[in-house]
Amino acid sequence: MQFSESWLRSFVDPALDSEALAHLLTMSGLEVEEREPVAPPFTGVVVAKVLAVVPHPNADRLRLCTVDAGGAAPLSIVCGAPNVREGMVVPCATVGASLPGGLKIKRAAVRNVDSEGMLCSARELGLSEDAAGLMDLPAVLVPGTPFREAFDLDDMKLVIKLTPNRADCLSLHGLAREVSALTGCAVTLPSCAPVPAAIEDRLPVSIDPAAHDLCGRFSGRVIRGADARAATPDWIKQRLERAGQRPISALVDISNYVMLELGQPSHVFDLDRIRNGRLGVRWARTGEKAALLNDATIDLAPDFGVITDGDEPEAIAGIMGGGRTAVSLDTRNVYVESAFWWPAAIAGRARRLNFTTEAAHRFERGVDFSRTVDCLERITSLILAVCGGAAGPIDDQVLALPARAPVRLRAARCNRVIGMAFDRESIGRTFDRLGFQWTATAGSDGDVFTVIPPAFRFDLAIEEDLIEEVVRIHGYDDLPAIPPASVAWMRVLPETRRSADAVRAALAGRDYFEALNFGFVDPRWEADFAAAGTDAPAPIALVNPIASQLAVMRSTLIGGLIANVQHNVNRRQPRVRLFELGRVFRRDPAVADGPLSVAGIDQPMRLAAIAHGDVDPEQWGVKPRPVDFYDIKADLEAILAPRVARFEQAPHPALHPGRSARVILDGQAIGWIGELHPRWQQRYELPAATAVFEIDWMAVASRALPSAAEVSKFPPVRRDLAFVVERDMPARALVDSVMADLPPFVEGFEVFDSYAGAGIESGKKSLAFRVLLQDTRKTLTDVEVDSSIARLVEIIATRHDGRLRQ
Amino acid sequence: MQVELDRIVSEALASFAQAGDSPRLEQDKARFLGKTGSLTELLKTLGKLEPSARKEAGAAINAAKSLIEGALDARRQAIADEALQKRLAQETIDVSLPGRGRGQGGIHPVVRTQQRVEAIFRSIGFDIADGPEIETDWYNFTALNNPENHPARSMQDTFYIDGCDSDGKPLLLRTHTSPMQVRHARTHRPPIKVIAPGRTYRVDSDATHSPMFNQVEGLWIDEDISFAHLKGVYTNFLQTFFETDELKVRFRPSYFPFTEPSAEVDMAFDSGPLKGRWLEISGAGQVHPAVIRNFGLDPERYIGFAFGSGLERLTMLRYGIGDLRLFFENDLRFLQQFQY
C-alpha cells in the first residue's frame, strides 16, 4: 500500500513528525517499508508567468523572455525550450536557486545577453524524465508562489507492507482510522453526501439466487452525458501518482481514486456498450470465456463469479472488467457499479490466472460491505464535478451480508495469553478507539467483553483476534520479557544414539569440510550418478523449478559434492575433501503416512563424503600420493566404529566398477563406497583421483553400548602367517572362515600385507596375517600355540585352497 | 709419603682434566689406579711399613684414592654430558616447520549456528525434532490455519513436486519448518518444548533470497506459556546466542495464520558495524487456537508460543557474512574459515 503522507494527513493529522508517524505505524503492525520525499531537494524555484517572448539577438534557438516571478520588476531570462510561449506559467529557478544535481543558478550572460534565472523542465527539477520542454503549469497559479508549496513537494511517499489480515488498511480512510485509534486524533472524512437523481434511467441487474455466496450486495447507478475526455484534476492525479498509480482518464482515475480513498473497488461500464441493456451476476459455467479489459481472454472455471450482459460473461466479478464495456475517451453514458463480493468467492482466483488486480486483492481479503452506496455517491459527485452529466437513481440490491457474530473476550484469558494484566478500563478504551461496539459483564472469572466486529474488519472472529488487538493497541513495547518456569525433567539422547554433531566433528577431524547443497539438482546428475531413468526409477520432478538445473529432487548426495569439487577445482584448489549430511528423495510405495513420513515418498537422511586430489595436504615431509579407495574406506570405517561394516564388491553407476563396494552393516546394505568412474572424472573435468562414500545416516547414528571383556594378565603370542591364494580371493573371506571356526586361543586374525608379483605364481597372491593368541588364565605353551596355528592353516587350506607360504 | 700422595693426586687431577674423551681418560685412570698405576704401586709398599705407620699411611692412600676416583667420575660425567650436548645440538630441528599429516576440516557455518541454537535450547530442556522436507498440503498449510485460497498463502511461494498426497493434494517442499510443530505436537503430550531446525524451500532467488534455506522452529506448549514468556525466551536466546546482554530486542505486531497475537522480532546490536539498526530476526507468536486443536489439544487448556528464525540470517550476523550465496557455493576458501 503506497500513498503520500499529505493525503493521509488530510484525513487525520496527529502532532507527530513524519518519522514519528512512520514509527507509530510500524509499531502497530503496519510496517512502513519505504519512506522517501516525493521530490528531490531544491530551493529558489517559484511559479512564474512568461509575459513576453522575443528572439535572442545572437542565437537562433534561444529566446529572451520577460518573466513575472512575483518580484517588484519582471526578470529577463534566456530560454531554449521549444514550448515557451507568452502567457505560459512555468517553474522558474531564480538567482541563488539550487537545483537537484548541484546546479546553482547565477546571474549570467548567455551569448552576451543577461539572464536572471532559468525556466525549468520537469527533469531539471528531478520530478520526471520529461525534458521535452518547460513544465506547463496551471494558469491559476500566482507568480511568485514557491514552487514546492504550490505542488506540495515537501510531501513524503510511504509504502506499507500490509499483512493479509489488514484489508481494512488498504485505503486512506482505513489508515486514518488506524492512526486515530493509536493517537486518539479525530478523522475527517470526505463527503459522501447523496447525489440526488437528475434522470430516471436505471440498468436492470439480475442476480442469480444461486450466487448468494458470490455477490452479497450490488449497488449501481447510471450517469448520462459525462465527458470522458475531461482532464482529471491535478490534485487527483497527484495523489494517484504518489500512490504509485498511473493516471489514465478521468472516469478510470476517479474510480481508482475512490478505491484508494475509501477502500471500495468500483467499476465503470460504458453504458452504450452493454449489450441487451442489462447486467446479470452468476457463477461461470464450464467452457465459458471472458474477454477482459487487459485484452486477455480467460477460460473460466465454474468457481469464478461473472457479471454478464444478460447472457455471456462480460467481467470477472471482483477481479477485472470486460474489454467490450470498458470506458473509452468516447464514452458519454456510464453505469457505475459498487458491490460486495464475498472473500471466499474471489480468494485465489486471480492467482490462478497468474495476475492480480487492486480489486481482487481487496475483495479476497474483505471490503467494508456497509459502504457500497456511500462510495457510489462519492464517485458520482466526483464524476459530475469533473466530467459533468446527470446521475440516475441508485439501485442497491442486498442479498447476503457477512453476519457480524459477537466475539467474546474474557479478560482473564486475555491476560493469561499475553502474560500481562489489562483491566476492564484499558480493554474498553482500546475497543472504543478501534470503533468496536462492545458490552462488558462481570463473569465468575472476571470481566467478559462482547464485541460486534465493525463491517470493515474481517479479521475478528475469535477471542484471540481481540486479544491481539488489546496488546497491539497498547503497544508491544510494554510487553514484559519473562522467562517461564518449568518442570525440570532431564532429557538426553540414549547413549546408543550418536548425535549428528559428533559425527560431523569426527569427519571434520579427518580433514573434511561440511557442505550444504540444495535438495533439488540437475537431472543430469541423477542420470549420471544414480542411473535415474535407466537402471533406477526417474527422479522426483519439481512442477515449478526455478531453473532447469534445479529441476529434480536428489536421490543421492554425490552429484552435489562432485559439483562442489568442480567449483573448487576451477578456483585452483588441487585437493578438496567435503561431506554432507542431508536428505535424499525417492518414490517408495511402501512408505505410509506417519508421524514423520509422507506416503509414497522415502526421504532418508544420508551421509556422504568426497575426497579429491592427494591424501594429505601438500607439505614438506610427506610424499604426495593420490587418494584411493582404501583411504576413504579408512575414513568410513572410523566413522562407523565401533561397528564394523563389510564391503562387497559390486557395481554402482557413479563408481569405477573394479573399485566400488556395497557397504553392509549387520547384514543390511547401508550404502556405497568407491572411486569415481573414470568416465565421470573426465566428463566433470576432475583432474585428480576422486573417491566417495554415501551411507544411510541411521547406520551411523546408532552404536552398541560397550560391554567390557576381561583383559588378560598374560602376554599375547603373535604369529605371522602368509598364504598363497587365488588372486581374486577377497581377504575378508579368509578372515570370515577363521572367525566362523575359531581355533583355540585365537583372538585376532588380521591381514597386514597383500602381495602379488615376483616370487608368486601368476594368478595368485600372497596374503599375510597377524595371528594373536591369548589365554586369560595362563601363559600359552608352544605346543598349544602350534596346535592352534596348525588348525588355522588347515582351515585356510581346505576352505580356500590356500597354501602356507614358507 | 704424604708429599708423594699429594703429587700423585695433583698429577691425576691435571691429567683427567686434560683428557678430551673417554678412551684417553680410561688410559689416564690406568696410570694411577691400574694394576701398575702409581697409587697401586704405593699401596704395595704398605706391607713394608711398621704396623703402627701402616694404618696411618693406608688411610692417607685411601683418601688420595677416593679423591682420584671422585675426580675420575666427575670427568667421566662431564665427557658424557659433552657428548650428549653435541648429539642434541646435531639433532636440533626447525620447529617452525608445519606439522605433518592431514589437516583439520570444519563444520558448515549454518550448521554451526544450528548446533549452537540446539545447545542453547537443550540447556532449558527443549527436544530437537526433524522431519520430512517433501510435505503434504495439510501439514504445511491447512493444519497451520492456512487453508487453500487463503490470501496468506501468497506470502510464501511454494515449490510443488510431481505427485499427490493421500488427500489428492499436490505434494510440496515445505516452505517453513512449522509443519514440524504439528508433527511433533501430535505425537507428544504437553509440556511440549521442541525446536526443529531444517531445510526449507521457497520460489525465490536473488541476492538476499535462496530457493533453499534453513530455519529453526521453536514451540513451547503448556497450560500457562504466554506471549510475555515468548519475549522472555527469545530475548534470552538472542542475548545468549550473540553473547551480549546489551543486545536490544523489540516485538512488532505482525500476522501469520498460525499464531495470534503474532510478532516480528527485531534486534539491534549495541556495538559493531550494525550498531543501533533494527534487524528482523524472527516471526513468532502465540500458537493459534485452531492450530492447537490440530495438535489434538484443547486450546482452552493449552496455550503457548511458536517462533521461526532463519539460520542463515543468524549466521550472517554472528560471523559477519555479507552474501547469502556463499553458504551454498561450498567454496573451500569460505568453509576453511570455519575449521572445527
Image (cartoon, helix red, strand yellow):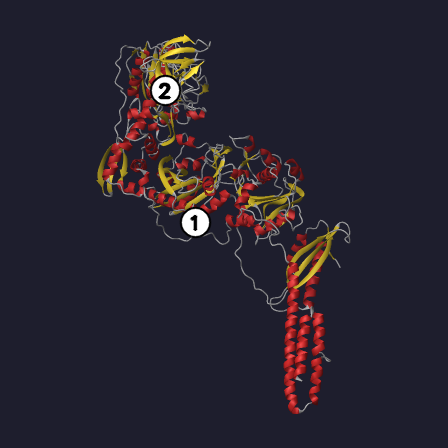
Task: Note whether A190 is above or below A225 in the view shown.
Answer: below
Rendered-image quadrant of the N terminus of chain A: top left
Q: Could you say which quadrant of the image residue A189 lies in?
A: top left
Residue at the image point whose x is 67% and y is 91% from the top: B50
Q: Position of residue B246 (x, y in %)?
A: 38, 45
Q: Chain under label 2?
A: A
Chain identity of mark 1: B
Above or below, comparing residue A295 to residue A607 in the picture: above
The image quadrant that residue B336 belongs to is: top right
Say which quarter of the image contains residue A473.
Answer: top left
Question: How dense is the environment of label 1, judged by Cα within 10 Å: few (below 14), some, or many (20 and up)?
Answer: some
> Whole-percent x and y of residue B326?
52, 38
Q: Which mark is residue A150?
A: none
Looking at the rendered image, the quarter that the C terminus of chain A falls into is bottom right
Location of mark 1 (residue) = B122
Pointer 2 residue: A45
Provide residue A652's location: percent of width, then percent of height: 63, 41
Local SS, label 2: strand
Which amino acid does the dot numbered 2 rest on? Answer: Val
- Work out how far the residue at label 1 is from the one at label 2, CA to CA, in angstroms: 65 Å
Q: Is residue B143 visible?
A: yes
For the residue pair A347 and A391, the one nearer the viewer reads as A391
User: Can you give x and y, in whole percent of width and height, for residue B198 in the image?
Assistant: 47, 41
The three-letter code of the residue at mark 1 reads: Arg
Q: Is residue A234 above or below residue A458?
A: above
